[in-house]
Image (cartoon, grey):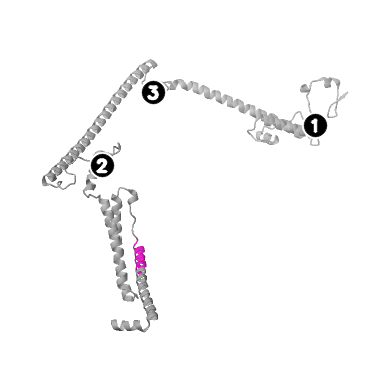
């Protein structure tokens, strides 16, 4: 007699039967487990295996292996439970079967799609060649397509020739317009030259050039510098020798003379008012200052015109400030008053010194002189 793992006695004949051929593989108490029907609920099976749907086959195997170690009756662990192990094993089989069915259905679906594509491909073949041109048999459509390509190439050649001719015409028109502009410039230049020549001849006939210094003498040479135009240099020298001054030099001179005149004028006006400044004199001084500010404003406009024509940037001028000029005039007036008081004090000191030195003689001399 032999004893199995559950404690039941087996005969020698039963013990020699392979495990897979035994009619009853497990016994749990007095209950026969070989007739246990696994549930077909896939979601419950995934839940028993502590997994989620869509997991991989490796995850399923690892989870089954861990649960089998935990619940297998022969594991000898404290959590061994034959019923739980049977549920885990059945859930494992259900999940494997579900994955196999899904894989098979996917393969069948792919085969159906491939068969469907193969079935429909010949129906659309005439849209996938010859650029969809023509109709009829493939040979007829090929001839039609070749004719279509010839016509398209001819149209492209004609379009290219058309664009080329248009570009040539545009270039010709531009050249003509440029020639017209250049001819106008030449005509204007020639007209100006003729006008200048006529003016020179007229001035010579009137004798305007008779008083020029160096008349009838050859022009003096200057340094042979290759960067200086001899004609321009000689013309400038002739103009300078005869008292010609550029416009900006005359404007600069005018501005300087104007500011000096305004400064002297306001100082003279302040001196004329004198001291002390009564309310009436203060009103007069305010009117003088207002007129001075207006003159400075006009002078600054003249400076703007000067800065536009001056050829050298460093020669440009800045605006004058009316307030600063008024303060300057007052300081000048005070300095003049101090200079006047200094000689008076010196004269009084000399008289006192003469009285001390000569006494009654100096007094008698004053009386006699009167």
Is residue 306 rendered to the left or right of residue 187?
Answer: right
- The residue that label 3 is drawn on is 132
Q: Nearer the viewer, mark 1 or mark 2?
A: 2
- The residue that label 1 is drawn on is 75
Query: How crowded is the residue under tag 1: few (<14 C-alpha within 10 Å), some, or many (20+)?
Result: few
How far apart marks 1 and 2 lie (CA) works out to 121 Å
Mark 2 residue element: helix
Give percent across and percent down for residue 349: 38, 76
Q: Residue at x 50, y 23 (%)?
A: 116
Up-down relation of residue 338 to residue 210 (above or below): below
Mark 3 residue element: helix
Of the two numbered discs 1 and 2 on the same chain, state the one appearing first in sequence.
Answer: 1
Chain part drawn in magenta: 321-333
Q: 106 or 345, which lies in front?
A: 345
- The residue that label 2 is drawn on is 233
Residue 56 is covered by the magenta coloring = no
How far apart marks 3 and 2 lie (CA) works out to 81 Å
Q: 265 or 174, which lies in front?
A: 265
Mark 1 residue element: helix
Is residue 342 rendered to the left or right of residue 74?
Answer: left
Q: Residue at x 47, y 22 (%)?
A: 120
Quadrant including the N terminus:
top right
Dividing the picture into quarters, in which one does residue 179 lie? top left
User: Magenta: predominant secondary structure element?
Assistant: helix
Up-down relation of residue 50 to residue 331 (above or below): above
Q: Nearer the viewer, mark 3 or mark 2?
A: 2
Give percent across and percent down for residue 309: 28, 50
Give percent across and percent down for residue 177: 23, 35
Up-down relation of residue 252 to residue 182 (above or below): below
Dividing the picture into quarters, in which one does residue 257 lie? bottom left
Dividing the picture into quarters, in which one does residue 68 lie? top right
Q: Residue at x 49, y 21 (%)?
A: 118
């Amino acid at each position: 007699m032999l004893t199995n793992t559950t404690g039941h006695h087996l005969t020698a004949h039963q013990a020699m039967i392979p495990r897979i051929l035994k009619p009853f593989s497990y016994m749990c108490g007095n209950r026969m487990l070989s007739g246990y029907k696994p549930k077909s609920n896939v979601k419950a099976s995934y839940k028993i295996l502590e997994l989620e749907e869509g997991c991989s086959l490796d995850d399923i195997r690892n989870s089954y292996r861990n649960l089998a170690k935990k619940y297998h009756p022969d594991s000898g662990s404290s959590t061994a439970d034959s019923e739980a192990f049977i549920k885990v094993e059945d859930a494992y089989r259900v999940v494997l079967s579900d994955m196999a069915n899904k894989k098979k259905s996917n393969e069948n679906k792919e085969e159906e799609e491939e068969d469907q594509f193969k079935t429909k491909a010949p129906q659309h073949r005439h849209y996938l060649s010859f650029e969809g041109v023509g109709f009829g048999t493939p040979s007829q459509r090929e001839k039609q397509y070749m004719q279509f390509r010839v016509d398209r190439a001819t149209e492209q050649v004609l379009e290219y020739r058309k664009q080329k001719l248009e570009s040539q015409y545009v270039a010709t028109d531009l050249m003509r317009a440029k020639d017209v502009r250049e001819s106008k410039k030449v005509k204007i230049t020639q007209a100006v030259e003729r006008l200048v020549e006529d003016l020179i001849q007229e001035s010579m006939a009137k004798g305007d050039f008779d008083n020029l210094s160096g008349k009838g003498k050859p022009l003096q040479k200057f340094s042979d510098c290759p960067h200086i135009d001899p004609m321009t240099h000689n013309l400038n020298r002739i103009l300078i020798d005869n008292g010609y001054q550029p416009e900006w030099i005359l404007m600069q001179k005018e501005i300087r003379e104007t500011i000096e005149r305004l400064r002297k004028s306001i100082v003279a006006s302040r001196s004329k008012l004198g001291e002390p400044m009564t309310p009436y004199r203060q009103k007069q001084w305010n009117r003088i200052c207002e007129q001075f500010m207006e003159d400075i404003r006009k002078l600054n406009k003249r400076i703007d015109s000067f800065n536009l024509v001056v050829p050298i940037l460093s020669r440009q001028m800045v605006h004058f400030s009316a307030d600063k000029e008024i303060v300057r005039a007052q300081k000048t007036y005070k300095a003049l008053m101090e200079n006047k008081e200094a000689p008076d004090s010196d004269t009084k000191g000399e008289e006192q010194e003469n009285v001390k030195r000569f006494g009654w003689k100096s007094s008698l001399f004053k009386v006699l002189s009167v």
